[in-house]
């Protein structure tokens, strides 16, 4: 049986010890490392990627917090799944973690059986959120305008006016990429990337990149 490789990021030493003792007793779990900071976890990921990273949110200053670390992990190691394990219970933190790539949001007062279930389910590709955030999660999904399979949602105006390459450029622009970075990612010249950005600003009737990115975010394009 192939074990699930797990990293834990948690600044409290005794809490990390507790996780170690818990996971040692679970046959299909393999805790391959535990870290006080997300930076140490990211370094370890370069050498030995985990299947699951259990991520605390309130990590010690001046190191990066759990939301920033989750975003980096999701971008650099897409095969690794991040589970937020925290005492933070605000809707904003839950939404920010989910938008940053977290596959689950588990509160620390959950019992070990629930945590073990979540790890196994997420490892197989599932999403899991504490029941406290059920209404928040449901409200994040747009409601269909009809029950007709062909017209469940209205066509987005931005998608209608931009070409596929311009939409790709808008996505990268919304991620804060420069024209040089966009050109490298799309494998085009800098002038072509600049032209795509110019076309986007013109077609969307905005004056700068920030306004274009805001429009994309509001339209839930990406």
Image (cartoon, rainbow, N blue to C red):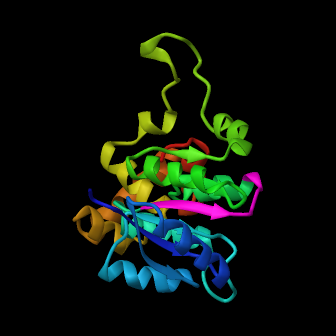
Magenta-tinted stretch? 81-91
For residue 147, side relative to residue 123 (left or right): right
How far across and how far down the image is residue 47, in percent?
Answer: 30, 82
The answer to whether residue 176 shows anywhere in this view is no
User: Is residue 70 rendered to the left or right of residue 110?
Assistant: left
**In the rendered image of this protein, does residue 133 appear above or below residue 23?**
above
Q: Is residue 89 above or below residue 191?
A: above
Residue 104 image offset from top left, x and y in percent: 55, 52
Report the residue at 73% width, 58% height from top.
Answer: 109
Residue 174 higher or lower than 217, as above or below? below
Does residue 73 appear to the left or right of 37 in the view shown?
left
Q: Is residue 87 magenta?
A: yes
- Viewport quadrant of the N terminus: bottom left
Q: Is residue 174 magenta?
A: no
Residue found 68% across the figure and 35% down from its top:
139
Q: Measured from the top left, where is residue 13 in percent x and y?
A: 64, 84
Q: Residue furthest bottom?
A: 62
Question: Which residue is at a point 48% across and 39% down the rendered structure image?
Answer: 158
- Which one is nearer the viewer's eye here, 52 or 148? 52
């Amino acid at each position: 049986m192939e074990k699930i490789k797990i990293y834990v990021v948690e600044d409290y030493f005794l809490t990390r010890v507790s996780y170690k003792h818990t996971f040692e007793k679970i046959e299909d779990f393999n805790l391959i490392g535990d870290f006080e900071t997300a930076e140490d976890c990211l370094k370890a990921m370069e050498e030995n990627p985990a299947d699951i990273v259990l991520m605390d949110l309130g990590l010690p200053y001046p190191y990066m917090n759990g939301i920033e670390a989750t975003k980096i992990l999701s971008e650099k190691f897409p095969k690794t799944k991040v589970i937020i394990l925290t005492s933070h219970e605000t809707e904003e933190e839950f939404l920010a973690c989910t938008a940053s790539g977290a596959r689950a949001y588990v509160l620390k007062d959950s019992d070990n059986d629930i945590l073990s279930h979540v790890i196994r389910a997420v490892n197989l590709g599932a999403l899991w959120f504490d029941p406290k955030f059920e209404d928040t999660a449901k409200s994040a999904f747009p409601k269909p305008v009809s029950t007709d399979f062909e017209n469940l949602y209205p066509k987005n105006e931005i998608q209608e006016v931009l070409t596929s390459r311009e939409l790709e450029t808008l996505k990268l622009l919304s991620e804060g990429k420069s024209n040089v970075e966009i050109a490298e990612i799309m494998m085009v010249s800098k002038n072509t990337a600049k032209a795509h950005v110019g076309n986007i600003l013109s077609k969307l009737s905005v004056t700068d990149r920030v306004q274009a990115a805001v429009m994309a975010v509001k339209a839930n394009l990406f």
